[in-house]
Amino acid sequence: MRRSAFFMPTLKEKPAEAEIVSHVLMLRAGMVRQASAGIYSWLPLGFRVLKNIERIVREEQDAAGAQEVLMPTIQAADLWKQSGRYDDYGKEMLRIEDRHGREMLYGPTNEELITDIFRHAAKSYRDLPKMLYHIQWKFRDEVRPRFGVMRGREFLMKDGYSFDLDFEGAKKSYNKMFVAYLRTFARMGLKAIPMEAETGPIGGDLSHEFIILADTGETEVFCHADLLDYDVLAESIDFDGDLSPIVDYWTKYYARTDDMHDQAAYEAAVPEDRRVRRRGIEVGHIFYFGDKYSQPLGAEVTTADDRQVAVHSGSYGVGVSRLVGGIIEASHDEHGIIWPEAVAPFRVGLINLKVDDAACSGAAEDLYGKLMNAGVEVLYDDTEERGGAKFAEMDLIGLPWQLVVGPRGLKNGVVELKERRSGERQELSPEAALAKLAS
Ligand code: ATP
Ligand code: MG
């Protein structure tokens, strides 16, 4: 993509409305634009990141055996009345009336709708287990939308749901999602720690929030430092195998948010020099809720010995749009964003330092063409801006690699390659740079 053609309305100044660094940087880099309070339009740079995050989430859900569906954003109120949540949900739910006076709503979540789909399709234990998910916009009329996309009113969520015959089955589904979530966030370059969360009236221990550490996080968190050292992607996973050793490893350590924190238990469980007390951002939540929805909505199957039982379910959410801000909170410096490779909007920022110099432009154009042919995603700054402004913008938008072509280097047959994260620069021939970036 040529910078001269790319729609990326960057801002030089810090926008007054933004309180935290990810919001500031997303606005400055022209990734999103607020449409109204807590509701955003995604501009090309931001949308590319959102799609990369979505793709990783999807790949891990598919690997874990969940199947993708797409449910609507608008739902009928009837199902919510059956589950009893129509009144409970309160003002966070956006309620709509259609032209026939029917009560509708913009879905804040989808337990009712998926249970309705499931109950009409599944009749027997042979239809189980099943895991279904979708990636769809949600609306919650939050009291205080803030921090940009981190706490929006409209936001993109992956929500998945499992259906099992009994608790043992449900626990297996839960473990699959537990491990899929560990992998999902690790692939985005994040350290996300599963922390014990409220289970509500169901009790038990099958509720975890996945939290990434960042100073601007809304919750205070407490955990054992060993959890931060674990390399999730080091082992390959068989989702059909026994995942309980992995889950047991993570859950044997103390890891809780302030809602669940118990200072005495924390001090007893974690040696002083291994205590981590930080702030965190919730990026995912997995939750077993038994027959909470299957019972009132009548999602029952016949067992092998011909009994009718309500299925056991869980729900599994990932804050896809929140992650865009969350990743920036976890990965930036004073100059701007530092995208982990896997979610970066482009892999390479190619800078032509002197567009009116024939040799310089020739070399830059040649590299651009060759990188594109090699399938590398490149943002090519071919504008007439001065060098300083180009460097500052590339640092701001945080592409993993910057490749700089200038007349002085070219005289010696070299271009400069800078790694955004470390700031390390090296001079090398255009061919060597190409070989490195195309690998
Ligand atoms: P929170 O405690 O942050 O309000 P929640 O517990 O209500 O979130 P869930 O219902 O568990 O959220 O939703 C699943 C995921 O969706 C959350 O882990 C979070 O990443 C994301 N999410 C929830 N609310 C918002 C929001 N207002 N804006 C952006 N993402 C959100
Ligand atoms: Mg939650």
Image (cartoon, rainbow, N blue to C red):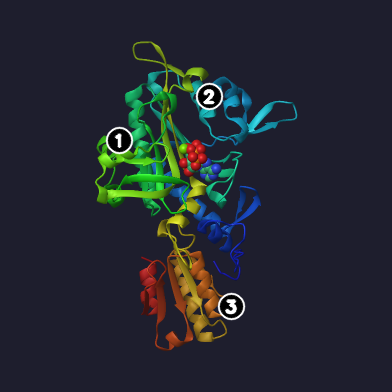
Residue 419 seen in render: yes
Residue 245 lies left or right of residue 163; in this view the side is: left
Three-letter amino acid code of the residue under disc 2: Asp
- Per the image, the residue denoted by label 1 is 240
Image position, residue 65 (x, y; %): 38, 36
Q: Residue at 37% across / 21% down in the picture? A: 165
Q: Residue 237: x, y in percent? A: 29, 43
Disc 3, SS: loop
Q: Residues within 10 Å of mark 3 (few under 14, many from 20)?
A: few
Q: Earlier in the sequence, mark 2 or mark 1?
A: 2
Q: Amino acid at mark 3?
A: Glu
Residue at (61, 47) in percent of width and height: 38
Q: Secondary structure at mark 2?
A: helix
What residue occupies the far top of the structure in this picture?
Answer: 306
Quarter in which the N terminus is drawn: bottom right
**Residue at mark 3:** 385
- Please report the residue visible at 56 percent of the width from the left and 44 percent of the height from the top: 155
* Camera-nearest label, 1 or 3: 3
Q: Counting other residues with Cα less than 10 Å from the Cα at mark 1, is it few (<14), some (14-19), or many (20 or more)? A: few
Per the image, the residue denoted by label 2 is 116
> Which numbered disc, 2 or 3, marks the residue closer to the eye?
3
Name the quadrant of the C terminus.
bottom left
Rendering quarter of residue 241: top left
